[in-house]
């Protein structure tokens, strides 16, 4: 192994530790933290890591500030972005149950995210609760919304408005979700 | 005259209705194009010449502000509709209602890529924890009870207590009456029309003395020895001493007026920049 290869192998291990193990209240690592730990070529290290993870159906995900899409990010944008390791493919319902969530919880989250997305990222809590009550028992609706807030999928302001939070931006492909929901109905 | 009053009242009601509608559009995330901006601006224009008192002018300004917020929402709405994320919320809501929860959950799983996060201990963190534990001082050493220091009983004088500001050298009511006379004298010497600017009275050589005077002044006003005249638009505040103490009856609603007496304000007053 050449010296250069050895250096990248060490950086790869360090990057794996940083990205897999939760170090703050939120998972993931900021770009500037990676630069500090791995050096300025950290995007290249992450690219190599992503190649390895692909075989495991995982990926290194980059979420830019405010969740916007950036095609050719600058170093500054990368420094401010947050990097995560996420599932590359999909879970089948059987696997999803292993996470500890009931089918109701997933359905409720899907409805909430889709509804808030369609309302430009903001909707009154009571409207969301009313929509969820159509399919879920009333006592569970409030608890579920509180749980989505606790996990970082949603956030709520003082006036009872719900917004999508960091975990939705990191985990959910909102456009795909809406397209799938609309097309699933068309098929039925 | 009556019809003019009725016309003004109608105008106020119309402006309030516009404000309420704009608010509901903002809060309920309704379609902002439900609001007819031109017609609402027309209403604001129509009644504007009637407004004379500040309350009406404030209502007019608030209406304009709310209309401007709706225009901003309209702009955002157009931007959102032009993005790929736009979906008709009513269409989506209808579709969600028609799907069963299993279909919804299955669909969600196709768009969901959960994050991987481990919270296990590593060998490194264990060794760090051990190092911390070894260097940690036992609780009984950290929380040693400190015995209270014994102080010998002694005697003191009234002058000493006054010097330490535990006692006042005068009863408070006497001090307040002296201060009231100071205000009356100040108005005669430096004031005009029976009043004096607030800062001209409370301002002193040192900041602590200024705060002390502001404190006493607040009691003068509260106990009916003087009153405040506040001109909000000109940002001027005057103190008006009464000839004799006025006892306010219980059915008069009193209001508190917060006045900032910060060090910065005092320095401005010293430089003659604050009136």
Image (tube, rainbow, N blue to C red):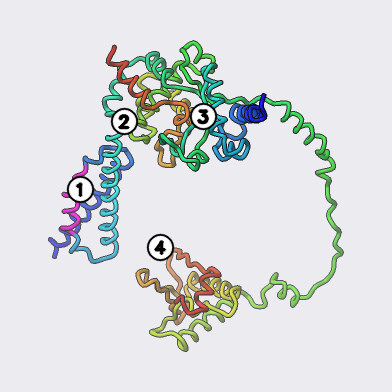
Residue with the mark numbered 1: B37
Report the chain holding disc 1: B
Label 1 sits on a secondary structure element that is helix
| Label 2: how many Cα within 10 Å (few below 14, some 14–19, many 20+) | few
| Label 3: how many Cα within 10 Å (few below 14, some 14–19, many 20+) | some
Report the chain holding disc 4: B
Q: Are marks 3 and 4 in contact (CB under 8 Å)?
A: no
Q: Is residue A56 visible?
A: yes
To the question of a shared chain for discs 1 and 2, the answer is yes
Residue with the mark numbered 4: B253
Mark 1–mark 4 distance (CA, rounded to whole Å): 40 Å
Is B45 one of the magenta-colored residues? Answer: yes
- The answer to which image quadrant residue B233 occupies is bottom left
Q: Is residue A163 visible?
A: no
Mark 4–mark 2 distance (CA, rounded to whole Å): 58 Å
Mark 3–mark 2 distance (CA, rounded to whole Å): 27 Å
The residues colored magenta run B35-47
Q: Residue B120: horizontal and vertical position, in percent?
A: 66, 24
To the question of a shared chain for discs 3 and 4, the answer is no
Residue with the mark numbered 2: B84
| Label 1: how many Cα within 10 Å (few below 14, some 14–19, many 20+) | some
To the question of a shared chain for discs 1 and 4, the answer is yes
Mark 1–mark 3 distance (CA, rounded to whole Å): 41 Å
Q: Quick check: B221 above or below A26?
A: below
Q: Residue B259: horizontal and vertical position, in percent?
A: 48, 67
């Amino acid at each position: 192994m050449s010296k250069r290869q050895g250096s990248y192998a060490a950086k790869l291990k360090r990057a794996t530790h940083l990205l897999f193990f939760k170090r703050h209240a939120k998972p993931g690592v900021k770009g500037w933290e990676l630069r500090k730990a791995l050096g300025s070529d950290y995007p290249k290290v992450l690219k190599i890591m992503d190649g390895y993870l692909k075989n495991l159906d995982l990926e290194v995900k980059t979420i830019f500030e405010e969740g916007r899409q950036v095609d050719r990010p600058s170093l500054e944008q990368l420094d401010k972005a947050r990097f995560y390791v996420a599932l590359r493919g999909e879970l089948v319902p059987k696997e999803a149950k292993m996470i500890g969530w009931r089918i109701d919880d997933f359905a409720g989250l899907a409805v909430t995210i889709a509804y808030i997305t369609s309302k430009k990222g903001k909707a009154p809590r009571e409207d969301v609760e009313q929509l969820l009550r159509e399919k879920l028992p009333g006592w569970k609706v409030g608890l579920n919304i509180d749980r989505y807030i606790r996990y970082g999928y949603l956030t709520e302001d003082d006036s009872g408005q719900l917004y999508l939070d960091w975990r939705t931006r990191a985990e959910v492909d909102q456009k795909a979700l809406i397209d799938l929901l609309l097309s699933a109905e068309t098929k039925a | 005259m009556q019809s003019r009053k009725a016309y003004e009242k109608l105008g106020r009601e119309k402006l309030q209705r516009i404000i309420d509608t704009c608010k509901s559009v903002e809060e309920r995330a309704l379609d902002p194009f439900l609001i007819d901006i031109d017609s609402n601006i027309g209403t604001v224009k129509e009644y504007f010449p009637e407004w004379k008192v500040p309350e009406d002018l404030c209502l007019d300004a608030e209406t304009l502000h709310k209309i401007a917020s709706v225009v901003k929402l309209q702009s955002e709405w157009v931007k959102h509709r032009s993005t790929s994320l736009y979906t008709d919320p009513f269409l989506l809501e209808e579709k969600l209602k028609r799907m069963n929860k299993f279909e919804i959950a299955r669909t969600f799983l196709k768009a969901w890529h959960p994050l991987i996060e481990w919270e296990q201990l590593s060998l490194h963190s264990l060794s760090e924890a051990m190092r911390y534990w070894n260097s940690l001082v036992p609780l009984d050493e950290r929380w040693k009870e400190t015995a209270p220091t014994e102080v010998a009983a002694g005697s003191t004088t009234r002058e000493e207590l006054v010097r330490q500001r535990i006692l006042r050298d005068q009863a408070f009511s006497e001090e307040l009456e002296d201060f009231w006379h100071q205000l009356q004298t100040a108005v005669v010497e430096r004031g005009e029309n029976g009043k004096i600017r607030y800062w001209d009275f409370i301002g002193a050589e040192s900041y602590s003395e200024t705060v002390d005077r502001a404190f006493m002044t607040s009691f003068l006003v509260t106990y009916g020895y003087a009153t405040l005249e506040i001109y909000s638009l000109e940002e001027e505040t005057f103190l008006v001493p009464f000839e004799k103490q006025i006892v306010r009856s219980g059915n008069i609603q009193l209001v508190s007026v917060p006045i900032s007496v910060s060090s910065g304000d005092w320095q401005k007053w010293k430089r003659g920049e604050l009136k």
